[in-house]
Amino acid sequence: MTLIRFKASQEQDVDLSRTYDAVVVGSGAAGGMAAHVLTAQGMKVLLLEAGKKIPIEQELRSMEWPYDHPRRGEFPPGDHALRYNEYTVRQPPYAKGAAFKHVFSYVGGWGGSDYVKNILVDEKDHPYTGTRYAWVRARLLGGKTNIWGRLALRLSDYDFKGKTHDGYGEDWPISYADIQPYYDKVDTYLGISGHNENLPHLPDSLFQRPNKLTAAEITLRKSLATMGRVLTPYRAGVTTDGVKNKYRSKCFGRGACGRRPGGCDIHAAFDSPTGLIYPAMDTGNLTLRTNSIAHEVLVDQNSGKARGISFVDAVNNRTYEAKARVVILAASTLESARLLLLSKSRQYPNGIGNSSGHVGHNFCEHVMGPGATGMVKELVGAAPTLDDGKPGGFYVPRFRNLQDKQPGFVRGYGFEGGSGFSIFPDGAWDTPGFGGQFKKTVRDHAGAFISLGGFGEVLARYENYVDLDPAVKDRWGIPVLRFNYQFGDNEKKMCEDMATTAREMFEQAGIEVIGVDKRILTEGWSIHELGTARMGSDPKTSVLNQFQQSHDVRNLFVVDGSSHVSASCQNPTWTIMALAWRSCEHLADEFKRGNV
Amino acid sequence: MSELSRREMLQATAAAAAALSLPGVKVPLAGPQAAKKFFTPAEFAVVDELSDMIIPTDDKSGGARAAGVAAYIDARLAESFEPEPQVQWRTGLKAVEDLSHELNGKAFMDSTPEQRLAVLTRMAAAESDPKTPAEKFFKLIKGETVHAYYTSKIGIHDDQGYKGNVYQTGEYAGFDPT
């Protein structure tokens, strides 16, 4: 099958003598969305991306068989991905003193590491310090959207109004009704697949056709229904019926997304470049500059307003200034916080937008690790079926602390799971013995496994924060982040419950439990970091208002996950984009009225 | 972003287990003819035989020998960035010979098939908690054999009959959530 691919339209010439309407820092989900919304409103936008633009289709090679790759998909000699043990026994910076040529975060250790070696950052160039944290970063056009996990979920008022519900933390300055129209816009513009379940705590999207389930998943779904719980097909930020976008194909269920750390070379899965940035370029209003590492928000001495961005060119190491009437940070939760803290001036001695002292604080995410693996005996010995031709397996939405009240913890968790035949037989590593019996056992059981793992809300706490390391700098001489972050008692109690309920759900469904994992993975493992510049209506306890606009500097916006008030337990990408759409629409209106 | 599914987690764990047994060892880009060799011919013969005893040919599919498992391991070791894996393999293969002499009074490849089976059976006796050099080597060679075999053409297609990695142009395979 041949798919027609369109080349991105010509990049606009960058003119740094000019003052752009807006400069956007970061080209991932948030920055791409800002570029899309603002250029559609006619604003002239300069988009700065720290990484390079790479020929991503050639990089991902989604359909390449393992045996057609000289190292079966693995890294070349001298490249190394950090392992779980390295994160736990050592302190950051993890690559310090490593003899390897390149060191990557743990994601590089998944199947197909060679396909991400130009996507993940080299930890040697990008150190960080402090408490242990598995920080996964991708510096290239599109950022982590190039390899994201695709689970696209909405938040509900159980999340936005969590404090009202259970008394913990802060409510968001918006409710579901405020963001719902923007979720709809994101669904329609980018495409999402899923099955309507009509749940108040996990609102349905405007779905295209869903992924199908396996026989094992149907069994579990039916059983869970008797417990008042739900198993729904993976809600994937993937277009299964197609969208009006010449840079993207619809999904053909090739399943490469599950075999590799992610990435889709036909762009059926959302990624920021093809989904947002290339179409924005076609408006003629977007200018892109890659290899541009922002390190300071520049301030106008007289007005106190932001006047642009100072950045280092990653290739020639020279420093440049980009001038704009509005500055929009979308560099990721942690990089945007770093940039705010780096932007110290006479007016803003603690970093721009930080009069509250909350920048870097209230840092939260998802905790993961506990889960279970089971075996469906009826499927042992079954003939192979096509089970992995989809962007993901299934999702079990939160069921804790909705109507009930758990004694040990507040908030909740959901499960992601999968089952059935895959390209590498599940169980091959763990089946004991050798010889003909071993080989037959692996074959007979290959399609009978089902597994799930929890993703739980980590409470936003002021005491969990990042700040700037006073001594350590990255390859370009920019001070790095220092982590002061760890899971607390609520997370630990929640994780114990995850392991218990995972087992209970399999047992109830008559699925043989062959393993229960109680281990909590290192902080950061979920790659869902959030909350370092939270929104709120009180400028004393929040950094941004409900439109992700700085309380202190009215032409400064932070439109990424740093603005989230709480983590919820749902994966954040779709909410990041819906919020950015809402804020940028508001910003464009205000800009036209001369109010920013 | 991550949404690391449970399956991906299992794959990650599996990959980590493989990496743990053989850290930093990789394969050359060139074809088999151009590939550098690590094993001596005598060592290669032992690895080839042991791998094929771990995953033998049966009525469904060829085994590790047919899938070229030993050559794959050899090529990876030859380009190893770290010295430890080469040491582990050389030490492990010596442990096999020592065990063969202890049990059978002769080198592994000079032994009868029954005698070789006795050696491998002893090596595999403490798989969940290996202590002796030969027991530890079993974990190493089994892990690498499993990885190389199930990523080979024979492993994926002949043995597993894998149906995926194809364009589904109509309905997706599977069941509707009713």
Image (cartoon, coloured by chain):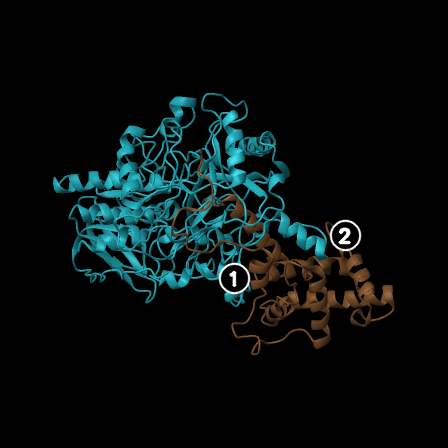
Question: What's the chain of the residue with tag 1?
Answer: A
Looking at the picture, tell me which residue is in the foreground, A453 or A305: A453
- Residue type marked 1: Pro
Which of the 4 image quarters holds residue A496? top right
Q: Position of residue A273 (x, y in %)?
A: 31, 54
Quadrant in the picture for the C terminus of chain A: top left
- Which residue is denoted by mark 1 in the rendering? A66
Q: Residue at x 23, y 60 (%)?
A: A9
Is residue A578 shown left or right of residue B126? left
Label 1 element class: helix
Question: What's the chain of the residue with tag 2?
Answer: B
Chain A display color: cyan
- Residue type marked 2: Ala
Quadrant in the picture for the N terminus of chain A: bottom left
Q: Residue at x 33, y 65 (%)?
A: A317
Above or below, A194 against A482 in this view is above
Looking at the picture, tell me which residue is in the foreground, A123 or B71: B71
Chain B display color: brown
Q: Residues within 10 Å of mark 2 (few under 14, many from 20)?
A: some
Above or below, B42 against A481 in this view is below
- Which residue is denoted by mark 2 in the rendering? B126
